DNA sequence: TATTTGTAAGATGTCAGACATCTAACATTT
DNA sequence: AAATGTTAGATGTCTGACATCTTACAAATA
């Protein structure tokens, strides 16, 4: 991982202070000079940090007036919103909401893909299911997760919708770690294999409703897995 | 509208050149010095422009090596992707894909809202339907569109999912203009009123499947409207 | 008095030049 | 052939200055 530049550090710290509630939405953040003094960096460094936050619509910079915090629903960065949402008492709620979002996109993409996926991609899907089965047999957790993610990626591309892919990309990153966690359990792996098999067969039939339903069942299972996993972590 | 700063201009022009294919994904953009010479601005201005594009994951800046263009599916800015997608031969395809995306989010949000919406919000929904009816009667296009958007906003909030709202916000902006265009036709307005009425009633029944289905029908109608509108524009 | 205008403070926008540090390629030495 | 040194070019950061915009307040005006 690349060492963070000063700009990144300043942006992170400022975002932390915003998320901590020090600068509520609508209020202004300290001026560039004040921040450069506080963080012991030059004003240019502060400005570049501000620019990154402005590009994510977290801040609004207004010349001559100051720099202001935007309301959370205007933020364009899923990760930043996730950080903000996880800050409160219930990290669990944020995780569940993420799955809900993923469910919308994946079921939608699967429905679209049913009418657009190629025979070659169908074959690839079955290949990944086989890979999951093999990884399950040999206790290869990284291999299992990799095939799982690749499976969903194929469907996403097959939906032929650029915007869905764009919106899903940050989700992909955020969920990757959690996926490895939940996939640790062998019975969860077995459930997942069955669902993926059903999804591949549904897509092969080119039945949009059936494909959507199969993916929906998979998402429901994922949500249930997460809930029990989170519950378990809480009791522990 | 605020006059654009030099930073914004440089960022826009650079993005334009990227979208035009001058710098394909994976390739490097000209160095900061070269760009500052070409655009006749200082290096700091170029750097700030780069930072905004980097924050949107359009560029990856690597110290000592250069600055590189990310593949389109890693871009975090819906608007930028929209610009890139609209560049090609078919602006229509991009518009349709946007509706597809909106359909996923809105039907998903509506399904969630069914189990979470308050009685007060139900009343507000009916109020907006009445407002749409009234605006329709008095040929008040802006009023009609405003009530329409507000209606969907209520459902979005009622879904109680922060991430859906975040992802939907840029869509909201992008679709706003088109909405005014399609809503010009009186028969389309009538269709919309009927659909909104059905959605409000479905939500009132707290039936998730029914609510989703009602919203889905509305989205399907919107897609059909768009298609005929686009077709009409093409023949003209 | 009420309105307009002028002035100044504070904020962001931009510039110039300099030095530091990282990367990659090439030349040199072993 | 491999390890090492050198160098060019790229981004990272700093300093200090001036420009321009917004706002508030004071002063001049009708």
Image (cartoon, coloured by chain):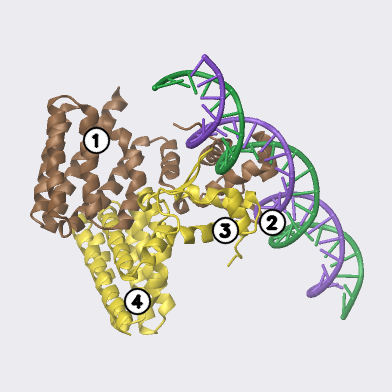
Chain colours: A brown, B yellow, C purple, D green
Badge 2 crowding class, 10 Å Cα cut-off, few under 14, some 14 to 19, many 20 or more, is few
The answer to which image quadrant residue A218 occupies is top left
Q: How many marks?
A: 4
- Calculate the distance from the C-alpha at mark 3 to the C-alpha at mark 1: 40 Å
The residue beneath circle 2 is A64
**Which quadrant: the C terminus of chain A?**
top left
The local crowd at label 3, few if under 14, some if 14 to 19, many if 20 or more residues have their Cα within 10 Å, is many
Q: Secondary structure at mark 1?
A: helix
CA neighbours of label 4 inside 10 A, class few (<14), some (14 to 19), many (20+): some
Q: Which residue is mark 3?
A: B10
The answer to whether residue B118 shows anywhere in this view is no
Badge 1: residue crowd in 10 Å (few <14, some 14–19, many ≥20): some
- In the rendered image, which residue does mark 1 sit on? A146
Q: Secondary structure at mark 3?
A: helix
Q: Looking at the picture, do discs 3 and 1 lie on one chain?
A: no
Name the element at disc 2: loop
x and y, in percent, of residue D9 in the image: 57, 43
Drawn side of residue B203 relative to residue A17, left or right = left
Which is in the foreground here, disc 1 or disc 4?
A: 1
In whole angstroms, how far apart are the C-alphas of marks 2 and 4? 40 Å
Residue A101 rendering spot, x and y as whole percentages: 30, 48
Is the C-beta separation of discs 2 and 4 under 8 Å? no
Considering the image in quadrants, where does the N terminus of chain A appear?
top left
């Amino acid at each position: 991982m690349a060492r963070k530049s000063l700009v990144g550090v300043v942006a992170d710290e400022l975002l932390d202070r915003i998320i901590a509630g020090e600068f509520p939405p609508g209020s202004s953040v300290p001026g560039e000079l004040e921040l450069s003094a506080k963080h012991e960096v030059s004003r240019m460094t502060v400005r570049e940090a501000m620019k990154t936050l402005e590009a994510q619509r977290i801040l609004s910079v207004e010349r001559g007036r100051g720099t202001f915090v935007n309301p959370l629903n205007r933020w364009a960065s899923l990760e930043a919103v996730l950080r903000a949402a996880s800050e409160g008492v219930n990290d669990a709620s944020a995780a569940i909401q993420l799955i809900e979002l993923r469910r919308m996109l994946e079921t939608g993409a699967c429905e679209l893909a049913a009418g657009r996926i190629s025979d070659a991609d169908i074959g690839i899907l079955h290949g990944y299911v086989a890979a999951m089965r093999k990884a399950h047999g040999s206790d290869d957790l990284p291999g299992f997760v990799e095939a799982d993610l690749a499976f969903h990626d194929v469907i996403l591309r097959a939906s032929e919708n650029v915007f869905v892919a764009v919106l899903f990309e940050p989700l992909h990153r955020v969920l990757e770690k959690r996926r490895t966690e939940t996939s640790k359990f062998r019975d969860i792996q077995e459930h997942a294999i069955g669902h993926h098999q059903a999804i591949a067969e549904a897509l092969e039939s080119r039945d949009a409703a059936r494909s959507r339903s199969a993916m929906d069942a998979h998402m429901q299972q994922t949500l249930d897995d997460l809930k029990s996993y989170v519950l378990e972590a809480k009791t522990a």
